[in-house]
RNA sequence: GGGCGAUUAGCUCAGGGGUAGAGCGCCACGUUGACAUCGUGGAGGUCGUUGGUUCGAAACCAUCAUCGCCCACCA
């Protein structure tokens, strides 16, 4: 083995072997365990959020697989309608063509071609992360099977009256020319203006002043509304105004919707271009005047001067004309709530169109109950509140999109507009008894991408065919996802899963936090703070990193700033940390449900952790026999052996508990602590005198060798779910010596509580107590050494004062250990009446360790050292005594707490006494 | 306007009614045959504010402050 762990050489080889061997597929006859991957967009590449999420899912998957569960981690990708169409359109544009030049069929063909050539890069990147998904079951939402599931659900919902077609206002993206669901519209605060316009009365003098942020829509006004209780305007209700520029007569109406306190208390009503106005219009039976084209320029219904103008140009022109007419009352600066499409960034318009909707309430009801009754559990629990809030206020879901890439809506129209819904045209003709001669044309629209995503938990398993996989793996065990898609995806899966499978799609929903940069900023291309997980695995030099971050920017003028920040933060580029270090970092940061600042310091530390493990393994391999020990060869376990086994066992128990609670951060912390600070820092050091000492029996040597190997082998299995690569690589060498057989660590049993323990519990208890004593002893000597500046290499004599028989037994039995760990020369108990030489002191309970000072130690320094300890102890003692003197404490606190406090106070007292004695002796030397 | 979350060491974060923790960083010492991606020792915190509950609060409750996020139709 090399002196330093170098992941690059190992990871690809190890992964290829796992994949080629088919080990990711469900196996065995244990209970089913299933996680569905949230399908990444086919256009996507792996970002930090994916890498984090994949680490969590893979750790859970590997843990359960090792537990013997029949485990499936289902992979796949999403066709991502709008995103993918935009990518391919951009490519066409670069060739100087548009999708209309190609026509629908050729365009769709082109998208498939793009997918075959450049789509799904993320699958390769997932492999680099070590993801143990079952590639043999890989799915794509536009696969024939999944498309059949989409058609089946659509037809079924339609037949049941849960899907309908209707004309109403939708969120219209005038750039992409498609409808959007409410969720795809992002509301933002933007600087704008509030314009106050005068609308003259049609008869007599006077006018009303209306305030609007959207002057261009006034061309479509069909009323002005005031509040019914607003006395200022009560006399005008029912009269008419002349709509300026247009000249149309419009009524003044009264409606509760108006807030009398806002602005002038008069609102212009434009039913065709505002969701609220639409409702007002309905209540008052107002006419709708649509003034926009589908690109949101003015249509032919408006006065000639405005026809064809873009909406924002029209706005300026209308304000100018109102001003020249003397009808512009005033203009105020105003923060405008602006809706934008989440993909295009275009300002979205409420626009009157025919669209398909899912009637959501009947589906939402059981989905709410499923969470209320605990059939689905959110982790952490508080996300269920978010879920309920949304589900209780949910609106019908607009599922049609005016795109070409996606699942075409399985609806056909006859020449008079009759609607027929079926699996295909033949099915429709059969179902509705339409003769072959009746011309039918299919709906041009496709379905919202999230419609097919909502079916993912069962469509991937073969539904509507009743497959074995469906029986085995539905419902899934847990869904691992970010809170940002609870509405988009989680809620819809629950609704459709309950509807079509009659059961929840998963038992638990584990919601993880969002990965942010070291300053808490969201990572984004335009901020230039994106980290690519692959760069953390493989490393990247500074110039490549700068080039990567500054190329392809939407706003190229940001490049210099990004470059500067990048050069400052990564003067030497990014080191190659390896996938395991990255995964361990994610696991360690995976505290539930809060944002995560990705701190490079952490990954640095965990790379070192990999190296530590690697070197511990090197030590073990170099110092144990390659021969498997004979079954009946005499082996004898030392206290240290029993101690480390007990510690390992305690760690195993913790890990199981933390996995059950999805606390990967605590799993990581527990295994880190054990590996570094118990196994390496103490046990490996304790093993050295046994393995290398002269006066050691073969049986003792065998016992320690076996313990080193067996605990390491178990530890590798314990670490495997989080660090699959390095554990596999080491395990291949360690396992045979530790008596473990098998082709791969990933199919070995996960350590169970009790496995590692050797011998009876009583012996283990004694061993643990002895080793704790040894550690206190060693720490005491080291502290003297460190604080008194004694060379680490200098062997010291230690005298034991005030020792019990137990102390002397321990000192005798563990003399070799003490000498090695604390670099001691001799350990000598003093008789009770034997005079002690001047010495530096450390306490182990009531036992006083003395390091004689002649020539080594400065009396003054030792005194001030002891005085410092004394001061600390006095503080603690005062606190404890204060409590004990408080009769309320003694009277009310539980007896055990009081007893514990008494004990503490007594301990402090004794220690102070010891220190005091020692100080007196030192004082006598001055 | 509603809702949620956060506030603990210089930084990133655990913890949780009775002794304040980790990693990184910092200081000192160290080329002891696993590892300098290391070892040993050390310094460093009145746990955001103000009240309350309690024998006891960093933890529970309330209030405020600051920051972040989600939802919502005052034009």
Image (spheres, coloured by chain):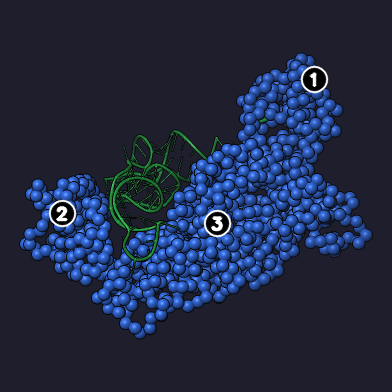
Q: Is residue A833 left or right of residue A225?
A: left
Q: Which chain is blue?
A: A
Chain containing the residue with disc 3: A
Are marks 2 and 3 in one subunit? yes
Q: Colour of chain B?
A: green
Expressed as whole percent of the image width and height from the top left, the position of residue A707 reads 36, 73
Q: Secondary structure at mark 1?
A: loop
| Disc number lying in front (3 or 1) | 3
- Which residue is tagged 2? A855
Q: CA distance from mark 2 to mark 3?
A: 54 Å
Expressed as whole percent of the image width and height from the top left, the position of residue A141 reads 70, 59
Crowd around label 1: few <14 · some 14–19 · many ≥20 (10 Å): some
Q: Secondary structure at mark 2?
A: loop
Hey, which quadrant is residue A139 in on the image? bottom right
Crowd around label 3: few <14 · some 14–19 · many ≥20 (10 Å): some
**Observer-nearest of A380 and A525:** A525
Chain containing the residue with disc 2: A
What's the mark number on residue A202? Answer: 1
Q: Is residue A835 above or below residue A546?
A: below
Q: Residue at x 56, y 71 (%)?
A: A70
Q: Is residue A398 above or below residue A811?
A: above
> Who comes first in sequence, dot 2 or dot 3?
3
> Who comes first in sequence, dot 1 or dot 2?
1
Residue A164 in sight from this viewpoint: no
Expressed as whole percent of the image width and height from the top left, the position of residue A524 reads 59, 45
Q: Residue at x 32, y 79 (%)?
A: A635
Q: CA distance from mark 3 to mark 1?
A: 75 Å
- Which residue is tagged 3? A538
């Amino acid at each position: 083995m090399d002196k330093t762990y170098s992941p690059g050489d190992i990871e690809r080889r190890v992964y290829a072997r796992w994949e080629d061997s088919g080990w990711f597929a469900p196996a065995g006859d244990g209970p089913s365990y299933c996680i569905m991957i949230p399908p990444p967009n086919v256009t996507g590449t792996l970002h930090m959020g994916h890498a984090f999420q994949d680490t969590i899912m893979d750790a859970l998957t590997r843990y359960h697989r090792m537990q013997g569960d029949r485990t499936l981690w289902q992979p796949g990708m999403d066709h991502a309608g709008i995103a993918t169409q935009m990518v391919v359109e951009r490519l066409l544009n670069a060739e100087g063509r548009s999708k209309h030049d190609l026509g629908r069929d050729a365009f769709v063909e082109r998208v498939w071609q793009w997918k075959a050539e450049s789509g799904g890069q993320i699958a390769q990147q997932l492999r680099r992360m070590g993801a143990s998904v079952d590639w043999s079951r890989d799915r794509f939402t536009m696969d024939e099977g999944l498309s059949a599931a989409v058609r089946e659900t659509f037809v079924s919902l339609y037949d049941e009256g849960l899907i309908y077609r209707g004309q109403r206002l939708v969120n219209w993206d005038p750039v992409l020319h498609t409808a959007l669901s409410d969720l795809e519209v992002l509301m933002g605060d933007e600087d704008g203006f509030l314009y106050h316009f005068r609308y003259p009365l049609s008869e007599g003098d006077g006018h009303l002043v209306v305030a609007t942020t959207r002057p261009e829509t006034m061309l479509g006004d069909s009323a002005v509304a005031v509040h019914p209780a607003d006395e200022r305007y009560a006399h005008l209700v029912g009269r008419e105004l002349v709509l300026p520029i247009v000249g149309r007569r419009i009524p003044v109406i009264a409606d509760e919707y108006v807030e009398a306190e806002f602005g002038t208390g008069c609102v212009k009503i434009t039913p065709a271009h505002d969701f609220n106005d639409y409702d007002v219009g309905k209540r008052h039976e107002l006419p709708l005047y649509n003034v926009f084209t589908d690109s949101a320029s003015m249509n032919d219904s408006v006065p000639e001067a405005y026809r064809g103008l873009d909406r924002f140009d029209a706005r300026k022109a209308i304000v100018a004309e109102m001003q020249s007419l003397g009808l512009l009352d005033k203009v105020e600066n105003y923060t405008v709530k602006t809706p934008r499409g989440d993909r295009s960034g275009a300002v979205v318009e409420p626009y009157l169109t025919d669209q398909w909707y899912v009637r959501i309430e009947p589906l939402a009801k059981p989905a709410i109950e499923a969470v209320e009754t605990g059939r689905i559990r959110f982790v952490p629990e508080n996300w269920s509140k978010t879920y309920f809030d949304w589900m209780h206020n949910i609106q019908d879901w607009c599922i049609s999109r005016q795109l070409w890439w996606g699942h075409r809506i399985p609806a056909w129209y006859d020449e008079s507009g009759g609607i027929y819904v079926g699996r295909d045209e033949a099915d429709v003709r059969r179902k509705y008894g339409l003769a072959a001669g009746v011309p039918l044309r299919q709906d041009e629209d496709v379905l919202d991408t999230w419609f097919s995503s909502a079916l993912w938990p069962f469509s991937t398993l073969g539904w509507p065919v009743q497959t074995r996989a469906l029986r085995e793996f539905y419902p899934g065990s847990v869904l691992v996802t970010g809170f940002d898609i609870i509405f988009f995806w989680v809620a819809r899966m629950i609704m459709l899963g309950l509807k079509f499978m009659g059961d929840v799609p998963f038992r638990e929903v584990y919601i993880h936090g969002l990965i942010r940069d070291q300053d808490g900023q969201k990572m984004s291309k335009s901020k230039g703070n994106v980290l690519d997980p692959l760069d953390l695995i493989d490393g990247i030099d500074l110039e490549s990193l700068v080039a990567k971050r500054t190329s392809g920017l939407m706003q190229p003028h940001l490049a210099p700033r990004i470059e500067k920040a990048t050069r400052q933060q990564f003067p030497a580029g990014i080191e190659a940390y390896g996938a395991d270090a990255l995964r361990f970092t994610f696991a360690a940061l995976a505290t539930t449900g809060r944002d995560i600042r990705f701190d490079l310091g952490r990954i640095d530390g965990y790379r070192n952790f990999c190296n530590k493990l690697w070197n511990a393994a090197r030590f073990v391999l170099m110092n144990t026999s390659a021969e498997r020990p004979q079954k009946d060869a005499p082996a004898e376990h030392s206290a240290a052996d029993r101690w480390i086994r007990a510690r390992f066992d305690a760690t195993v128990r913790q890990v199981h508990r933390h996995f059950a609670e999805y606390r990967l951060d605590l799993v990581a912390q527990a295994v880190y602590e054990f590996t570094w600070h118990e196994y390496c820092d103490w046990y490996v050091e304790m093993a050295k005198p046994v393995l290398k000492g002269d006066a050691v029996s073969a049986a003792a040597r065998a016992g320690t060798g076996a313990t080193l190997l067996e605990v390491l082998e178990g530890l590798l299995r314990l670490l495997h779910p989080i660090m699959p690569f390095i554990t596999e690589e080491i395990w291949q060498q360690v396992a045979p010596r530790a008596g473990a057989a098998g082709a791969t660590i990933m199919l070995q049993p996960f350590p169970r509580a009790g496995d590692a323990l050797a011998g009876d519990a009583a012996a283990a208890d004694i061993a643990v107590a002895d080793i704790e004593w040894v550690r206190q002893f060693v720490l005491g000597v080291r502290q003297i050494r460190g604080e008194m500046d004694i060379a680490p290499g200098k062997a010291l004599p230690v005298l034991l004062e005030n020792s019990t028989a137990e102390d002397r037994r321990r000192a005798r039995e563990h003399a070799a250990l003490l000498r090695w760990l604390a670099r001691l020369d001799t350990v000598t108990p003093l008789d009770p009446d034997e005079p002690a030489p001047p010495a530096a002191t450390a306490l182990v309970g009531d036992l006083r360790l003395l390091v004689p000072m002649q020539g080594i130690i400065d009396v003054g320094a030792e005194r001030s050292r002891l005085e410092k300890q004394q001061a600390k102890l006095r503080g603690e003692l005062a606190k404890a005594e204060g409590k004990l003197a408080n009769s309320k404490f003694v009277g009310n606190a539980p007896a055990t707490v009081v007893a514990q406090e008494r004990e503490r106070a007594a301990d402090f007292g004794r220690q102070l006494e010891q220190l005091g004695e020692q100080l007196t002796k030192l004082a006598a030397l001055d």
